[in-house]
Image: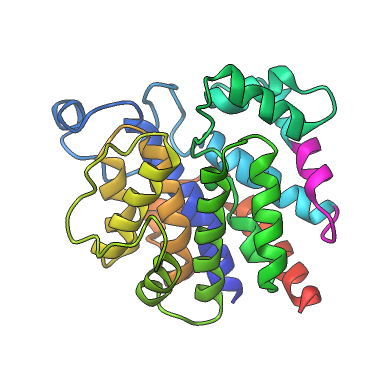
Amino acid sequence: MLDKIQGGLIGVAVGDALGATTEFMTKDEIKAQYGKVTEIIGGGVWGLAQGETTDDTAMTLAVVKGIMANPNDPIEEIGKEFLLWEKTDPVDIGITIRTVFGNYKGDWFQAAEEAHHQLGGLSAGNGTLMRCLPIALAYSEQTKIDEISITQSKMTHYDDLASEACVIYNRIAKRLLEGESLHQAIQTEIKHTRYESNYEAEPDCPPDGYVVHTMKWVLYWLTNCETFEEVVVGATNAGHDSDTVAAIAGGLKGMEVGYRNIPAKLSNALLEQRSLLDYAERLYEIRNKEC
């Protein structure tokens, strides 16, 4: 199980670092500039160093640290970690989350609702889906996973579509930790939801920041790719919000294959690899205590 938990966190970071190079680009622009991105090289719109990650990994680690600080009720601590991260002046903060930070005066949920209205009702971004995996890694009880997944989403994204995606995603992750195959876990959890499909064809939407589009593309890559590398490379070279799609898909695929089966050329390129593995061990310890 530790290998799967490590694979989840490393998978998120690898997808993030790989996809950040092509974020906001189109397929044709990626092909013209890079041919095909298959290794972590940095650069991109944020001018990243090789192996550097973006807000996807940073906010995932904020959730990890919040859980570590108070496993029984981590929401307040997660909020503190969000604020600490914002103080580092990160280059990449999503529009919704940036708006929430501007509104925050001690109540995350009020700030999120205000942001929702300020953005014309458009708060169904993928910023909570990208960071929610640690909840499924740290807890074993379904009710608790669902509850915390929803609450951490509502801290910044008022729209129910965002929290709905987090619940489905973390239910898939829970099944993976219990030994179920990725394909079976996906098919079980998307049944009778807006995401029910066989995903034989590419989704008829761009892989952008709208959480429904993001989730459909994540499910597409996970359904149609055999290896971890195929999943994250595929998402990376599709462009648009490529770092987030690759991170979210990489988290589940990394869990399925385990850390030891993620290509070393990708995991070893991460600047944060050692700390990610250490955080995974802490989540594993918390999960064992919960059980």
- Image quadrant holding the N terminus, namely bottom right
Residue at image point 42% right, 36% down:
210
State the image coordinates of residue 228 (x, y, percent, origin top left).
34, 61
Residue located farthest toward the bottom when viewing the structure as drawn? 179
Please tell me whether residue 183 is drawn above or below residue 35 in the rendered image: below
Residues drawn in magenta: 70-81
| Quarter location, residue 97 | top right
State the image coordinates of residue 45 (x, y, percent, origin top left).
39, 21
Please tell me whether residue 133 is drawn above or below residue 291 in the rendered image: above
User: Is residue 91 part of the magenta span, yes or no?
Assistant: no
Please tell me whether residue 139 is drawn above or below residue 231 in the rendered image: below
Residue at image point 36% right, 25% down:
44
Residue at image point 77% right, 38% down:
79
Q: Nearer the viewer, residue 156 or 86?
A: 156
Please tell me whether residue 89 is drawn above or below residue 257 in the rendered image: above
Residue at image point 80% right, 52% down:
74
The answer to whether residue 104 is left or right of residue 161 is: right
| Quarter location, residue 242 | top left
Q: Nearer the viewer, residue 11 or 186?
A: 186
How many numbered marks, from 0 up? Answer: 0
